[in-house]
Amino acid sequence: MRSELDAVLRSSLGRRAFLKYLAIAGGTGVLAACQKNITAATQGGGASATETRPPLESEPGVLHAYEWAGFEVKPLWRSYAAKGYPDPKFSFFTNTEQALAKTAGGYTWDIVHPEVGYVQDYFNLGAVQPWDTSLISNFPDLNPALEKAGQLDGKQYEIVTDWGYSGVIIRTDHADPSINSYSYLFDDSLAGHISWFDTPWILLQAGLVLGVESDIFDMTPQDLETCKNYCIQKKKNLYNIWVDFTQMWDDVRQGNVWAAYAWPDAWVNTRNDAPVAYIRPKEGVLAWGEGLMLNANTENYYHAHEYANAWTMPQTGLWVINNYGYGHSNLKVDLSKVDPAVVRAFGLDDPVGNLSPPAALMDRYQPQRDAYNRAWDEVKAA
Amino acid sequence: MNPAVSRGGRRSLWIFFALLVVFLYAPILILIVFSFNDRTFVSFPWQGFTFRWYREFVHNSALLGALRTSALVATLTSVVTVVLAIPASILLVRRRFFAKGAVSGLLLAPLVIPLVVFGIALLILFNTVGIPLSPLTVAIGHIVIALPFAILTMVPRLERISVSLEEASRDLGAGPLRTFRSITLPLLAPAVLSAFLIVFTISFDEVVVASFIAGDQPTFPLYLFSQLRLPQRLPQVIAVAVVVMTVSSIVVIASEVGRRLADRRLERVANLQQEVSAG
Amino acid sequence: MTELDLSIETERRGRPVPSRRRRGRRGAVTAGLLSGPVSYLLVFFVVPVVMVACYSVGLLTLLPQDHYLSLRAWHDFLFGSIYMGVFWKSVRMSLGVSITSVLLAYPVAYLLALVAGRRKYTLLLVIVAPFLTSYLLRVLAWRVILGEQGVVNSFLKLVGIAPQGWLFYSQFAVYLVLAYVWVPFVALPIFVSLEALDLSLLEASNDLGASRWTTFRRVTLPLSMPGVIAAFVFVFIPTLGEYVTPLLVGGPKGFMFGNGIQNAFLQGFDWQFGSAMSMFLIGAVMVLMAVFGRFVSFRSVSE
């Protein structure tokens, strides 16, 4: 037996031939990869919008939601479950950039949950199609300041559900709340106790403090250079650049950090342990929304709409605000069931005004993301 | 008397070892302590003793599922990697063959590739060929990154095993397979065990590649990373880590028992060696 | 790549040359046995790397409309960026961490292999076991130990010494945590090569009047070199691309080459640039290993 096998191996697959075959096989794989990738990218982009779609009853029915951990819990889609639809299947991303990259690599889902700044990126990849807002009965109640950020060419590509600010948390025992500016993050008098988040948005905040002329989301090279140099110059004031927000919260609580780039949940989670204030700077606070986007080739079109409807219920909104410390896009959330201090800190009493200029600058697509990223790398490497 | 070490040297080596164990276990000890702390932050001050996190994770089926997935992936990865690495290591050490430099370079090359890049590229490949993402695809990726570690663990050992034993066995008429089974493999056993350990732990803890090529069944570290958005769940994860630690300690104790059995086997091999060299 | 040859030819010169037929058969068996790992890596490693190379020159792109052949990314990376400086910083860090880890691991491997006797495998497991606890959690724990309000600083305060800020969010922390991560892994290849050492060699050396130290230097150390080199490679290469540890514990100075690659792919969504950086890293390691292989002659340590 063995010698037979040896003989076969010897005659048919010499080493050279063997390696040659492998090389050929490898090359074919690469070529195939190239081809497939191109075709995958050129399809989609709402191509299926005009096709006749099977009705809800004939859809497979189990939605695949690619989500943040924590957004799989039932209170967020209770009304969907109540209608008897099967429970969705969830997979989780570790961060939003990773989700986009994984999608670009060909990973598919029915629904994904990115920030509004990434709507254009998903569209460019041909991964998404617009929602039919007439199928979402809650849609008229949603915050127009947010939903506008989810549109491209007048079509609703993202149903924005939850939102927050990228403001500053300060220790009021060390920093004066009345300054009310992003300048806390660069302030020499707080040296050694400032914490940035690891994001190019710090450059935007520097731009706001410096009052640069050009649009901070799409700065001219000179302005970007100015912001970069300002950050490099002020980097000496840092305690750290945080990546894990629980550690940042702890550093604020313990008094290691007096001013930090923070989302409102940081304030919600530290306000009982330390004298802190959440600052929405006078330059205009950077705000972000995130919500549901629909896959271009989903087989669960109507289920997805039902699901989006559940996510935009006022009850869902209340739950998100009270449990996660994020805002919610539905304007009919019963604020009497929310802590008044939270309402004040988030500006929930006037969510449209507080999320529009000049009070806030809403996140949006950054055409020069690569340039911003490299400038930010330079700041960190300095 | 041990020729490798003097009495004083022996003592200092043991002291050094003890210090290193303290170094290695200090963070573990911290985790154990804080898994009972009634607070969501891993930090002082102490807030009070609780079993809450343990109670909660027992009912967290997603977490337990992730743990199972990781155990499956790590087992699969370590078995396949070691099986691939044994012949590769032996041939690298014992044979001359065409393009040997290139082959050994290839076998070690996966050490180099940045994991993010590898994860994305592999995802595109799977997608192209039409392999659906699952624990299996994670294992496929982990085998690639673990293979060099396994080979690097076995090659130095093989270099120290004398060829004459194998030749003697052949001269006595044993076929290559028999020689491998009764001479090479037992002598290689410590390296195989080490490689298995290394690969298992690498796979069990790998998150970057897994984050791209895992489907809807996350591995344990992947689950953990995604939970970082939710501080409330962190203590549960720590409780699980403590349990994993405890279980692996039990494995250590079990292996002590296993070792005694293995020793007896090795004695048999040693006897065989003597027979061979005598013959 | 072809320079990298960790293997040692142990076939001895004096043996009769096998017949042509036998050699041919052995060749076939060799090819057969190697085909498993080699073809596995060709499919699941080489193909992805070739894809990355294609991305770096624009043969493959994220969006079909960008499809073009261009060396822009390479040019920008090599001549117009900070990343070369960062690369050398990473090389220095890798060297430091690998040397530290090997120095810490060698005595332990020595103890386990030559002194510990029958307990050695159990002790080996004792060393490796902590690594089943997630890396991320262990880093969190280090913060509790070394952080501003951590165990060490609390103790220092107790005995009247001011808290030391350099313990965490610092270069020191990066070295410490990386060495911590690698030591057990590094100990294993050294252990397995020492473990195969014939104690009678050491006895002979002692009998010939050599001191223990001389014996170690002239006999034990050279014979364990393959393990030491393997261990060094173990740490050095992966650490070059390391980015998580510097990010988590390095503080404001924690930016490394691996972070650059990670950010280019994810934050910047610039796969072409990221791919160029990755291919550079892969190439640079190949060159480093070739140079390294020149300086350390593996053959000299064989019997």
Image (cartoon, rainbow, N blue to C red):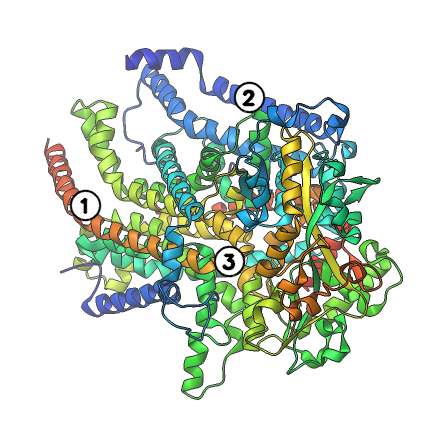
SS category of the residue bearing label 3: helix
Considering depth in this image, is B84 or A118 the residue closer to the camera? Answer: A118
Query: Where the C terminus of chain A falls, by quadrant?
Result: bottom right
Identify which residue is drawn at 33% across, 55% down: B243
Q: Chain of mark 3?
A: C
Q: Which mark is residue A25?
A: 2
Residue at the bottom extreme of this rendering: C160
> Is C193 positioned to the left or the right of B143 in the image?
left
Residue B114 in view: no
Mark-to-mark CA distance, 1 and 2: 44 Å
Specify few, some or many for label 2: CA neighbours under 10 Å numbering under 14, 14-19, or 20 or more: some
Q: Chain of mark 2?
A: A
Which label lies toward us, 1 or 3? 1
Asked whether the residues under the numbered discs 3 and 2 touch, taking CB atoms below 8 Å apart as contact, a structural biologist would say: no
- Tell which residue pokes out farthest to the right in this image: A213
Residue on which the image places disc 1: B258
Give residue A251's position: percent from left, percent from top: 56, 72
Q: At numbered mark 2, what does the secondary structure look like: helix, strand or loop?
A: helix
Place of residue A332 in the rendered image (x, y in percent of width and height, measured from the top left): 71, 55
Marks 3, 2: nearer the viewer: 2
Residue type beneath disc 3: Leu
Does any portion of residue A127 appear in the rendered image? Answer: yes
Label 1 sits on a secondary structure element that is helix
